[in-house]
Image: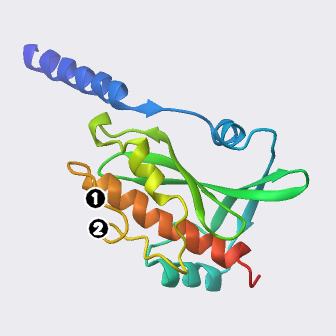
Amino acid sequence: MALVSSVLFFIHVLLFLNLLWAKEFRRPEQALSQIYPGSQIEVRNITLTREQVEEVQKISGAKMESRLASWYIVRKGGQIIAYGYVDMHRVRTHPEVVLYTITPDGKLDVVEVLAFYEPLEYMPEDNWLRLFAGKQLSKDPVRLRRDIPNITGATLTARAITDNARKVLALWQVLFGVQR
């Protein structure tokens, strides 16, 4: 009986520590409103065709988990000033939720972590996230250790954010790019 109580206590301690590690930040709409003050935000749910999914995967080298893509169209004065996409992916064993914003000409603008459930020492710093600003698929590889430096001690986080940045840029290109 003492062993069962000890095991249950240990499980509760681990669950509590996991909750302490988890860090939730802002909802996408809140983040976009602060990034682009005075803007209007429209959510557009798009179901990709199989061909579009294949094209995104070919361009980015990253796997698409779903054919459904929810985009935030950010307008100011009737003009589109940005596109936002929220990507949820697993880092090691737990998810992180990242907001990627893209300018109308296809460049990454802001990358912001909205929720992080891994231990906080693996969370990227804002100055590292700012390295993505201005990156676009037509001119930049957007690859870890090439044009994006690794984060010492947080390689899995750096890889997840970088790989998914390429996927989001490819998704934008397929859905909204200039040729569309």
Disc 1: CA contacts within 10 A as few (<14), some (14-19) or many (>=20): some
**Tag 1, which secondary structure?**
loop
Q: CA distance from mark 2 to mark 1?
A: 6 Å
Number of marks in the rendered image:
2
Visible residue check, residue 77? yes
Mark found first going from the N terminus, 2 or 1: 2
Which residue is under mark 1?
150
Residue 86, percent from left and from top: 59, 52
- Three-letter amino acid code at the position of disc 1: Asn
* Nearest to the observer: residue 40 or residue 96: 40
Q: Residue at x 47, y 75 (%)?
A: 140
Judged from the image, the secondary structure of the residue bearing numbered disc 2 is loop
In the picture as drawn, the residue positioned furthest to the left comes out as: 3
Circle 2 packing at 10 Å, graded few (<14), some (14-19), many (20+), is: few
Relative image position of residue 74 (x, y in whole percent) = 77, 52
Q: Amino acid at mark 2?
A: Arg
Q: Is 90 situated left or right of 33 in this image?
A: left
**121 and 138: which one is in front?**
138
Residue occupying the point 51% across, 82% down: 59
User: Percent position (x, y) of residue 63?
Assistant: 46, 73
Q: Which residue is mark 2?
A: 145
